[in-house]
Image: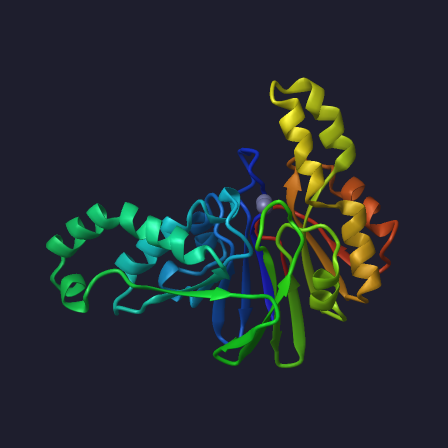
Amino acid sequence: MKVTLLGTGSPLPSATCAGPSSLVQAGGLNLLVDTGRGVIMRLIGAMVPPPLVSAVLLTHLHSDHITDLNDVITTRWISSPAATPLPIYGPVGTKKMVDGLVSMLSQDEGYRLEHHDDLRAAGGMKVEVHELNAGESFTIGDVKISVHETDHRPVAPTIGFRFEHDGKVAALAGDTIPCQGLYDMCQSADIYVQTVLREDLVRAFAPLVPTGDRFLDILDYHSTVQQAGQTAAKCNVKTLLLTHFVPAIQPGQEDEWRAMAAEHFSGEIVIGPDLTFVEK
Ligand SMILES: [Zn+2]
Ligand SMILES: [Zn+2]
C-alpha cells in the first residue's frame, strides 16, 4: 500500500504546494482522496494519468478539498479510451455539489460531444455519486474502506477513510480535531495521514493580515502538529504522515515541524513537499 501526498497545501495560496489531495494505491487501484488545487498536475507528477483514477473519495466539501474535482471529471473523461463512469464517494451533500459541477461543465461537454464521434457514441460524461455515512464500509476492488466520523465543526458532515488491503492499513483523516471517530479510524494503522496547522505561526501571522480575526477562526477545527502526534501515539500507528500545512512550510522548516509531533509520538514521522510518499 502506497500513500502519496499530491498536494500539501491548504486554502492559503502557495506557489509550491498544491491543494489538499492524497493518492492511495493498493490492489492495482488509484484512489484519490480529495481533489484540491492542482490535483491533475500532481497526478501526472505521481505518474498516474487521469484515465487511471479508479475513484474519488471526499472527506468534506470545503472548497480547498474539492476545487479541482471538475478538472478530474473532465480530464479523465476526455482522455479515457472507453466510457468509464467516475465513482465519487463523499459525505451527504456530495450529490448536490457534483450535480452543480456537472451543470457547470455542460456547455463544455456539449462542445466535445459535438466534436468527437466516439465520445458521443459512448453517451457523454458520467459520474456515479455515492453518499456515505459514518459507520459504513464498502469495497472497491480488493480494498476495504470504512467510513469514520470526524469533527470539523461547524462544517458537517465530515468523514475520514480507513483503507485495508493485504494486511496493511492507511487512515486518511481530512480536516478534524482529535475525536473518537478519528481514534477508531487510526487504530494500529500502518500509515496515518493528518492535516495539520501550526498554532504558534497562525497566531503570529494573524495581526499581519487584513483578515486577521477570520484567519484565527481556522484554529477552531484543525489538528495542531502536536495533536497529530498525540493521536498517532494514542492509536499506536506506525507512521505519521503530515499534510495540509497551515501555513505552508518554508524550506528548511521541516525538522521544526517534525520535532513538534515527535514531542508526543516516537514512531516514524514523515513530512515533505508535494509528492512525498510512504509505502508499506
Ligand atoms: Zn482544508
Ligand atoms: Zn476543511
Report the label total: 0
Between residues 114 and 182, which one lies in front from this camera angle?
182
Q: Quadrant of residue 279?
A: bottom right
Confirm whether residue 251 shows in the render.
no
Residue 75: horizontal and vertical position, in percent?
Answer: 32, 54
Between residues 184 and 187, which one lies in front from this camera angle?
184
Between residues 259 and 214, which one lies in front from this camera angle?
214
Could you tell me which residue is drawn at 50 percent across and 49 percent down?
A: 61
Residue 115: horizontal and vertical position, in percent?
Answer: 12, 53
Residue 222: horizontal and vertical position, in percent?
Answer: 69, 45
Q: Would you say 13 lies left or right of 38 here?
A: right
Q: Would you say 213 lies left or right of 33 here?
A: right
Check the image and report above or below for 244 versus 98: above
Q: Quadrant of residue 122?
A: bottom left
Between residues 8 and 125, which one lies in front from this camera angle?
125
Q: How are the residues colored? A: rainbow
- Quadrant where the N terminus lies? bottom right
Confirm whether residue 26 shows in the render.
yes
Image quarter for ligand 1 equals top right
Residue 26: horizontal and vertical position, in percent?
Answer: 55, 73
Could you tell me which residue is drawn at 66 percent across and 36 percent down?
A: 218
